[in-house]
Amino acid sequence: MTRLLIVLFAFATSAQAASKPNFILIMCDDLGWGDVGFNGGKHIRTPHLDKMAANGLKLTRFYAQAPVCSPTRASVVTGRHHDRTGIYTANNGHLRDGEFTLYEALAAKGYATGHFGKWHMGTLTRTVKESNRGAKKPENYSPPWNHAVDTTFATEAKTPTFDPMWKPVKSDEVAFGGNLRKGWNQISAGEKKELYGTHYWTAEETMVDPESEKLMGDDSKIIMDRALEFIEAEHGSPFLAIIWFHAPHLPAVAGREDAASYDNGSATGFEQNYYGCVTALDREVGRLRALLREKGVAENTFVAFCSDNGPEGKDGAPGKQGPFRGRKRSLYEGGVRVPSVIEWPAKIEPGSTSGVASCTVDYFPTIMDIVGFKMPDKRPLDGVNLLPLINGSMSKRPRPLAFHIRGKAAWHDGMMKAYGDVKKGKWELYDLAADPRESADLASQKPQELKSMIAAWTRWKASVDASDNGADY
């Protein structure tokens, strides 16, 4: 009888694990809204992302929580505005110990957790001169393994997107009318190599040998190799895999074959490397989708894709923000509206599209609802549950979407957007339905509406400040 009970318990446990969806959150670094085929981009080939969009839900009005990378990443794993978490902008602050993360929530539900690629929510070493901060800022030590991540393969910050441990060959090319001297190329065999200064880490004070052959070649492939190993190892158990590519953050370097595939006679070397590293990244998304299907888990795996902010550089740089105003570092649309897809065949009809405002801060409450997790306290979340949107019953975001970084602010209420310079006390108002390019400021025409939106943002910011001062811990 005891043996029968053990068998029945094992069967029930296995069935329960099989019913739990897996979660994979993919993020690019500085990829523009217009850089993907599924948003109409023609300059870069992204066939696998386009297939993902065709088989899932394309979110045409999806936002990064910030116009730079570290804050957006904090929003993903906490469901909270980054100012609440201790990360104020790139390389400023760290994910505090008191924050409750997606990794911890899913670990409590029996999930294996893995993080692959960029981390950028704190330093990964207290002892080594590393990347942007490392031992220079030991007070910002906040690595993945301190936040319930079982398997880590991560860098603190950026790396070259090819041969990531080594400084790429600098180009002398002067592009875009002479106002931009940028460009890098793959290191040739026999050329003298110099370490870039960013390393991959797997555990406390455990660095991957930067001279390892496993760290040579396309960085997106290097990251995906480790992620696929994790998925293979956890096959049969529910898992969370966060895969944060470095591409196409500068220095953008492609392998020679990928770069040469964009040599059309007019493309600069910078463009060829940028476009080529995005296509290489797209290829890795294809490998991931293929493995999920091979293992028979694609149907019940929630895969989300987005960028952490808009494209780097001025207008004319390789990254495209689509029809929108602004780029990276701006709270105008081009700095925070990013390409986004969710693929989950068990729940999402192929070819679905939504223009409802959604954001990286929404991943956390959505996944919490899917797995039935209740927060251990009443700390405020800024994200909203997107399951009604996935189910087709959400036609409007249930509450406004708020932004703040370095004295700039935005408040989205439906299709109306208030944009402000808080330090100067100057605010603008835009109707994104009629004017997605933000070319017509309606502040003088609708002063009462703008006043109401500013007041609402101010109340929200007071809550954020209270969190920042420790009220939630």
Image: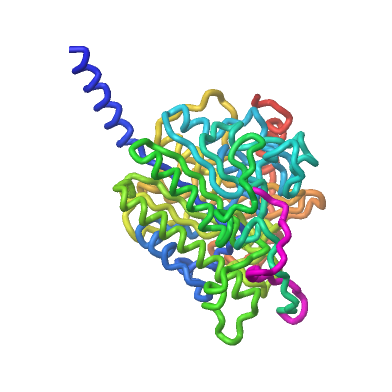
Q: Position of residue 353 (x, y in %)?
A: 40, 59
Residue 197 falls inside the magenta stretch: yes
Q: Residue at x 57, y 49 (%)?
A: 117
Task: Write the start and end of the magenta stretch as one range.
Answer: 176-199
Instruction: Report whether 12 appears left or right of 213.
Output: left
Q: Residue at x 53, y 52 (%)?
A: 223
Q: Which colour assignment does the render follow?
A: rainbow
Instruction: Report whether 152 appears left or right of 346.
Output: right
Q: Is residue 451 above or below residue 469?
A: below
Q: Position of residue 143 (x, y in %)?
A: 64, 37
Q: Residue at x 50, y 67 (%)?
A: 279
Q: Is residue 100 above or below residue 247?
A: above
Q: Quadrant of the N terminus?
A: top left
In the rendered image, is residue 84 in sight? no
Q: Is residue 323 above or below residue 83?
A: below
Quadrant in the rendering for residue 457: top right
The residue most toward the bottom is 265
Viewer-nearest residue: 281 or 472: 281
The residue most toward the right is 424
Q: Position of residue 114 (x, y in %)?
A: 50, 40
Count every numbered label the image shows and give the total.
Answer: 0
Q: Position of residue 305 (x, y in %)?
A: 48, 54
Viewer-nearest residue: 137 or 447: 137
Residue 332 falls inside the magenta stretch: no
Viewer-nearest residue: 295 or 316: 295
Q: Residue at x 70, y 38 (%)?
A: 125
Viewer-nearest residue: 270 or 217: 217
